Image (cartoon, rainbow, N blue to C red):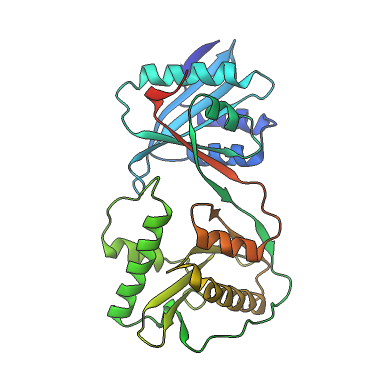
Amino acid sequence: MYFDRINNKNEIELFVRSLSSPEQSKDFFLNGLTNSSNTVSLAVRKGHEIIGVLHTWHNTFHPHITYMSMIIDPTFNLKSIAVPMLEQLKTEESEMKNRMQISFCSTDPLVNVFKEVGAIEVRRTYMPTIALRKKCINKEWNNDYNAIPLADLTNAFEKGQAIEFIHDTYIRTYQANPPANFSNDVWERLIFAEDTLLDHSYVITSVKDGAIKAFSLLHHIDTQTVEVGWVGADSANSFDLLDYVIVTQWNALVNQGYEKLEGEFDSTSPYAMHVLKSLSPNWEKALVTLQFDLNSLNL
């Protein structure tokens, strides 16, 4: 068994696709492989055959973490390959100071391998595909609140309030891996992105004082599919407002002929988990995200 710096992404992709590893683990690995800021691609070989690969990369939106993915031929003893790969990475990247983050399908045995050497689980991400078969019964609306589509936020002050509320909610959700300190202009471009369905993405405000209480964003994927984006509320007391908005969005999508609803629902967000539970009864399988300090692992 020996290590090899590898730049042939086609060779790695063929290796990954040939494995019987969980599909979510393979998808996460291949998505990372296409990242333009790839810093390390390290293969372990037995003879000329690849039996495992890891690579690391950086993300400008979340710059405080070095991302990593690893995949190993499951016909081998996983720990006996994973540990030497981590030791080799530690040797080659001795200046690495960031904490590292890696994700696997929840059914992937590598989750337990990493936990055994000291990695800490920080969240689970559920990614169901939900069929939009029929309309839902509308919930009774509380007249103390307004549901305002993003398309109607033409007032600079109102738009600024919405951007700040969504930004602050995101910060609370991702404390284990906070984003960079971007300006409001950057956040505006993210929230009012080209794929955001502005007519069907809402902020909920109080009639009494105009304060934002909740929000729910939708994004266009293709002619059949819409993605649930960021959701949030000021407190658990506003979850019923999220319920109303989700039903309103659902019925609008059915009316427009969409067939599927997708989303990435993180366990670190009580708002996203509330929406997930209301939308889908089947969401056990998840992408497990772990963090670790490479120099502190029990290798």
> Please, is residue 180 above or below residue 158 in the view?
above
- How many marks can you see? 0
Q: Quadrant of residue 152?
A: bottom left
Q: Residue at x 36, y 49 (%)?
A: 178
The percent position of residue 73, horizontal first and vertical second, equals: 64, 24
> Please, is residue 174 above or below residue 289 in the view?
below
Q: Is residue 176 left or right of residue 253?
A: left
The percent position of residue 79, horizontal first and vertical second, equals: 58, 20
The percent position of residue 213, horizontal first and vertical second, equals: 43, 75
Q: Is residue 247 left or right of residue 208?
A: right
Q: Is residue 159 left or right of residue 245?
A: left
Residue at the right extreme of this rendering: 133
Instruction: Classify the position of the N terminus by image quarter.
Output: top right
> Please, is residue 214 above or below residue 42 in the view?
below
> Please, is residue 207 above or below residue 54 in the view?
below
Q: Residue at x 46, y 85 (%)?
A: 146
Q: Residue at x 49, y 72 (%)?
A: 237
In the foreground, 207 or 254: 207
The percent position of residue 248, horizontal first and vertical second, equals: 59, 79
